[in-house]
Amino acid sequence: MSTQAKVAVGGVAVGLLLLIWLPLWAVLLIVVGVPVVAYLALDPSQRRRVRRVSRRELGR
């Protein structure tokens, strides 16, 4: 199993556990908030690189 697949499986497991223990609004806040905060923590050159890679993968 690839590293990306392991991360995806772990993310799904954590998401399911959060759904059991927290209310839905808190789970949505975490699921949306963590990636947004991580993206905003990047400096501008890293953000450009992330956008460029994302666009290139969409155009495959």
Image: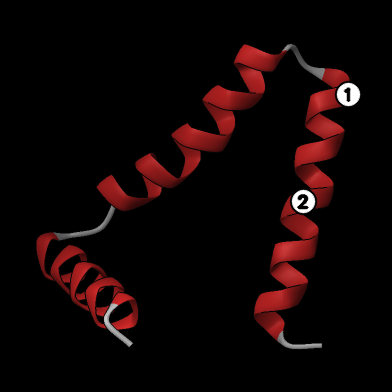
For residue 10, side relative to residue 48 (left or right): right
Quadrant for residue 9, please give it: bottom right
Q: CA distance from mark 1 to mark 2?
A: 13 Å
Quadrant for residue 15, please give it: top right
x 79%, y 59%: residue? 10
Q: What is the image's colouring?
A: secondary structure
For residue 9, side relative to residue 31 (left or right): right
x 73%, y 88%: residue? 2
The location of residue 13, given as percent across then percent down, is 84, 49
Quadrant for residue 4, please give it: bottom right
As shown in the figure, which amino acid type bears the numbered disc 1?
Ile
SS for tag 1? helix
Q: Which residue is mark 1?
A: 20
When the figure is inspected, residue 28 is found, relative to residue 38, above or below; the finding is: above
x 19%, y 63%: residue? 47
x 25%, y 58%: residue? 42
The location of residue 32, given as percent across then percent down, is 48, 35
When the figure is inspected, residue 36 is found, relative to residue 33, above or below; the finding is: below
The location of residue 30, given as percent across then percent down, is 57, 30
For residue 23, side relative to residue 32 (left or right): right
Q: Which residue is mark 2?
A: 12
As shown in the figure, which amino acid type bears the numbered disc 2?
Val
| Residue 47 numbered mark, or none | none
Label 2 crowd (10 A; few <14 / some 14-19 / many >=20): few
The location of residue 25, given as percent across then percent down, is 61, 13
Q: How many numbered circles does the render carry?
A: 2
